[in-house]
Amino acid sequence: MDFVKRSKEIFELEISELQKLAEKIGPEINQAVELIYNCKGKLVILGIGKTGIIGHKIASSLASTGTQTIFINAAEAMHGDLGMIDKNDIALLISNSGSSPEIINLITPLKKICRTIIAMTGNPKSPLAREATLVLNTGIEHEACPLGLAPTTSTTATLVMGDALTVCLMERRNFKAENYALYHPGGALGRQLLARVKDEMNRNIPKVYTDTLFKDVIYEVSNKRLGMTMVFDGNEQAVGIITDGDIRRAIQRFDDLKNLTAGDFMTHGFKKIAQDELLTEALEIMDENNITNLAVMENDSSSTVVGILSIHDIIDFK
């Protein structure tokens, strides 16, 4: 057998099933998002077997993106772990068949404890679906397993539905990169996202004045190795910026470079950021304005430049 070909067929089958499932999504996802967003307690995900493993992953994704979530194995729930659930919580039960005894046996006690039950099931007519407050349909027509027995496409569908729920809740909460970093402080990504501009900025500021001659501007830009220089007036106030691009354009535009001064070809005004802002905010400003350097100010209301932040300071940060 050609397993390259067979693998591609499996991918195609699962993608096809996911596309069909996507077309079935309706207002119930809006209701689920609002229920969970407005929940005064936490989201409790319960499952067993393969879907339990998927449920554990969904719980982890939700918890790391702003939704207070825990996972409880359905079998363990029947032996005391229901005590982790509070009246203000929402229970999300995952079962492809919707009729697993371990899941069905939880419905009665859960209704007495938390009242709101969301079902994520591949069978909208199952006992679980009939008892649930809301149903998220993950039903597929064909498993990738040639016997139609091993959970394959069905677990993929459940995982993707969980991803959809996670991302929708992130957007509902306006969850930002700095929020994500707060829950991931141990990794390189967390350290990068939590870093402040002042931690990485260059304090040796390239500096010329409006009357600085062209040749001296070039020297300052080259000497400080940031590809730019700030321009100050006689009152030591920053009034503009000169970049490598400004220098190239000046060479093309002016004939008398010998007497050209910084004030003649500088870019008036400049993009800036306060030193206590996050690096992510700086990166967003650079991206929006297609620039590679920012003037760093003492604070939002200050006119004092205390440093320069380069795109390389962010990219090279470890």
Image (tube, helix red, strand yellow):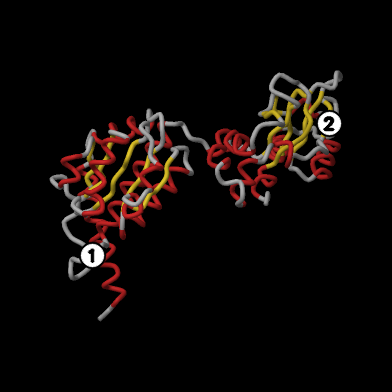
Q: Position of residue 169 (x, y in %)?
A: 39, 36
How far, Cα to Cα, is label 2 from label 1? 67 Å
Residue 251 can be seen in this image: no
**Residue linked to disc 2:** 208
Q: Circle 1 sits in a helix, a strand or a loop, which is it?
A: loop
- Going by the numbered disc 1, the residue's amino acid type is Ala
Please tell me in which quadrant of the rendered image residue 308 appears.
top right
Choose between 212 and 317: the one closer to the eye.
317
Instruction: Locate the N terminus by quadrant.
Output: bottom left
Q: Judge left or right: residue 135 versus residue 274.
A: left
Disc assigned to residue 144: 1
Q: Judge left or right: residue 28 versus residue 35.
A: left
Q: How many marks?
A: 2
Choose between 34 and 217: the one closer to the eye.
34
Disc assigned to residue 296: none
Q: Residue at x 28, y 31 (%)?
A: 31
- Going by the numbered disc 2, the residue's amino acid type is Val
Q: Residue at x 84, y 38 (%)?
A: 215
Q: Judge left or right: residue 34 versus residue 100.
A: right
Choose between 146 and 133: the one closer to the eye.
133
Label 2 crowd bin: few (<14), some (14–19), many (20+), radius 10 Å: many
Residue 85 can be seen in this image: yes
Q: Earlier in the sequence, mark 2 or mark 1?
A: 1
